[in-house]
Amino acid sequence: MKKSIVLAVLLTLAAFVSGAIAAAPPKAAGTAPAPAAPVSTKPAKVEKFPGEIKSVDAMGKSIVVAQGKEEKTFAIDDKIKITKGKKEALKLEDLKAGMNVIIEYKKDGEKNIATAIRVSHPRAAPKKN
């Protein structure tokens, strides 16, 4: 008999506790997560890299340029402006290994995106006396 009374008390207690939890008011909406940091809308800084073309991949739309021991690979899009001299426009297919160029580019994470390529004339070798 004692077991039945203890069991009845425990069941009654459990019913009251669960009813109190269910009737509790909901938590305030002020606990929403903080908004993400604002994304910078500043345009990426344009950088320049002068050097000599090592390779051109017209299908993959990329170009590798070296300056001394440093080599950089640049991605190329359809909007790129390629010039030789002041006004002569060139196509990507016109670029060949060994040409001297100045690449204007923007960094997109780890990727270098070329925005303009200027083909320059090779520097004259110093005269020997």
Image (tube, rainbow, N blue to C red):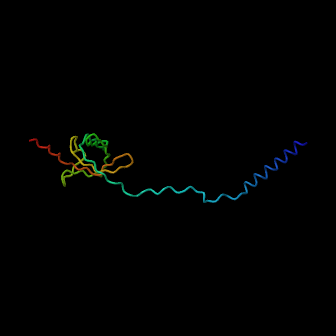
In the rendering, at what x and y percent does residue 124 appear? Answer: 14, 45
Residue farthest along the right direction in this orientation: 1
Residue at x-position 36% and y-position 56%: 43
| The one of 79 and 108 positioned closer to us in this rendering | 108
Residue at x-position 56% and y-position 55%: 33
- 35 to 68, vertically: above or below: below
In the rendering, at what x and y percent does residue 74 appear? Answer: 31, 45
In the rendering, at what x and y percent does residue 93 appear? Answer: 24, 44
Residue at x-position 19% and y-position 50%: 84
The quadrant where residue 27 appears: bottom right
The image quadrant where one finds the C terminus is: top left
Residue farthest along the front direction in this orientation: 129
The image quadrant where one finds the N terminus is: top right
- 41 to 103, vertically: above or below: below
| The one of 94 and 27 positioned closer to us in this rendering | 27
How many numbered markers are drawn? 0
Residue at x-position 25% and y-position 47%: 50
In the rendering, at what x and y percent does residue 107 appear? Answer: 35, 49
**Left or right for 85, reference 57:** left
- 69 to 21, vertically: above or below: above
Residue farthest along the left direction in this orientation: 129
**Left or right for 83, reference 111:** left
